[in-house]
Amino acid sequence: MRLIFKKGKQLEFLLHFKESQNAKNWTDLAKLLHVSPNALKEWRYETASLPSKIYSQIDPSGLYQHWIIEKRKNSWGQSLGGKNSLSGRNVIKIPTDSPRLAEFFGIILGDGNVYVNKKYGAYQIRIACHPIQEREYASFISDLLKELFDLKPSLTRRGLGLYVCIDSRELADYLIQNLPGLKSSFSYPSWIINDSECLKSFVRGLIDTDGSIYRLSNKNPNTIRISFKNVDKSFLSAMHKALLKLGFHPSKLIYGNIFLTRKADTGRYLKEIGFNNTKHRKRLSEIAPSYSGQIPGQTDLNGETKYIGL
């Protein structure tokens, strides 16, 4: 059973529970609820209705029950999608192994979701973005999808989130077959781990979606830290392995995080890998302006953003 809350109340409900549990962040709350961070993100953005079993776990006394305006069977959305979907008609171009494909794989594993329901004929690839901070990045992802697979995605605003969406059975099948980590523990395809440029692009895709950057000391704007956080230990181990292979000195796993802290490492990361997510670029220019000019492909002669690898 899925529960439909009055607009804005599902997020309020989850925020209230997060505060009551003293959870430091949404990733920790996902761990507490034994759900994926992407599922929790969709509930926060109110793009997906809350399962009744999750509601019962969070609110056994029913304090928020009066904000529930409708109850629906679990299959209602899939059934509608199956009747109206043209997903089987989207024929894709099969891309060659390349840094561009590696970056897309990192993006999908970071903030993407591949939904398949064969019973109702529903096949959807969806990548979540912040509707304000990552709107430009959503356009970048859309262009990447067009280039790699010759498909035109849609940018869809749902609830409090912005999504890059494609309904395509062929793309869903391709990703499940070619990207370990979607349905099982992650392991590197040989063409990524054995090619430094592909590996850098893969790392960039993951950091752009599941990473963050911040200043270590307010007294010294040149001390920054780049972090990667994920609840999946196979992703964390894969990131650690990748950074070591590329010659960096990542930290050990600390509460589901991996950090790059050495000044030589952070400076080299910005120069050799950088960000295609403009959210991180803007953040860097705010906290450490002296570093912002080091990102490859940051601006052209007109001051417009140029993405790495384009």
Image (cartoon, grey):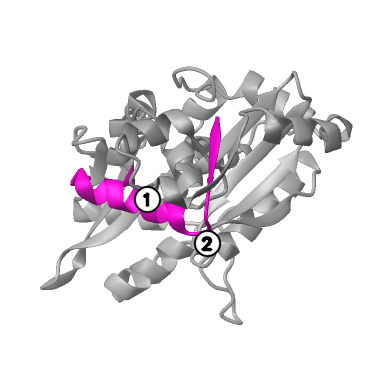
Give the x, y percent position of residue 243.
33, 36
Question: At x 14% / y 71%, what residue is drawn?
Answer: 218
Q: Residue furthest right?
A: 89
Q: Mark 1 or mark 2: which comes first in sequence? A: 1
In this view, the residue in front, 37 or 274, is 37
Q: Disc 2 marks which amino acid?
A: Glu
Alpha carbon separation for disc pair 1 and 2:
25 Å
The quarter of the rendered structure image containing the N terminus is top right
Q: Is residue 148 magenta?
A: no
Segment colored magenta: 1-26
Question: At x 29% / y 52%, what residue is drawn?
Answer: 16
Disc 2: which residue: 134
Q: How many neighbours does mark 2 have within 10 angstroms: few (below 14), some (14-19), or many (20 or more)?
A: some
Name which quarter of the figure residue 124 lies in.
top right
Q: Residue furthest front?
A: 66
Q: Is residue 19 magenta?
A: yes
Give the x, y percent position of residue 9.
44, 56
Horizontally, residue 288 falls left or right of residue 118, namely: left
**Disc assigned to residue 121:** none
Q: Say whether residue 168 is visible.
A: no
Give the x, y percent position of residue 30.
34, 36
In this view, the residue in front, 147 or 172, is 172
Q: How many neighbours does mark 1 have within 10 angstroms: few (below 14), some (14-19), or many (20 or more)?
A: some
Q: Disc 1 marks which amino acid?
A: Phe
> Where 300 sits versus 183, above or below?
below
Disc 1: which residue: 13
| SS at badge 2 | loop
Question: At x 59% / y 65%, what residue is drawn?
Answer: 136
